[in-house]
Image (cartoon, rainbow, N blue to C red):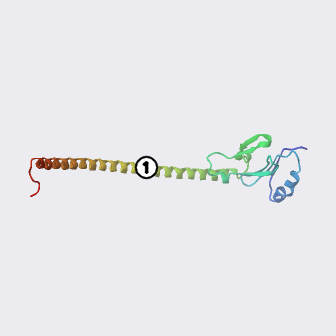
Amino acid sequence: MVRSPCLIVEILSPSTEDYDRGDKFTHYRRISTLKEYVLVSPDRMSVECYRLNDRGKWELTHYSLEENMLSETELEINLTSVDFSCPISQLYENTEWRNAAVDRVTAERERQMAARAVAMENLNRNVERAARTVEAVGLELENFMRKAEVSQAKIDRIREYLMGKNSNGCSTTS
């Protein structure tokens, strides 16, 4: 039996869960060497780690596969008191329901990745369409500018012609 533990891990059961979270944890907090108290759910991938911080307060870190579905990396459990880390799935490796839970999470991740791929495809199509529109507007603008230059050239020739008539003493009014 360990007399000065720095880590205590409890596997919860329906009949003792309230006691493990309440009175038992209250008693454990009196152990001066205890740094982490871990509660492991037996029926879903969920681990609660109570860790004593530098101010002497207990902080909860909750590791749950369902809550981590949006992440692309596997959820890693960190037990700082014993310098140990492992994926949450490793804790549940040989449980009967583990495969179903992992399959559910994997299916959700695949669905999200497919949705992202569709969104990216739509975005790329919209960007291409916008680029074609910008190119078409640019061509229209070039045509307009060419026509404006031609029109300006005609206006300049008419102005020169009229100015030339004025300098010869001819009247431009009838």
> What residue appears at the point 85 percent right and 54 percent down from the top-left corner?
25
Q: How many marks?
A: 1
The spot of residue 163 in percent (x, y) is: 15, 48
> Considering depth in this image, is 146 or 79 the residue closer to the camera?
146
**Residue furthest to the top:** 83
Quarter holding the N terminus? top right
> Considering depth in this image, is 147 or 121 the residue closer to the camera?
147
The spot of residue 77 in percent (x, y) is: 72, 45
137 left or right of 22 in image:
left
43 left or right of 8 in image:
left
The spot of residue 47 in percent (x, y) is: 75, 51
Residue 5 appearing in the image: yes
> What residue appears at the point 33 percent right and 50 percent down from the top-left corner?
137
> Considering depth in this image, is 143 or 162 the residue closer to the camera?
162
The spot of residue 96 in percent (x, y) is: 72, 51
> Considering depth in this image, is 34 or 144 the residue closer to the camera?
144
Q: Which residue is mark 1?
A: 127
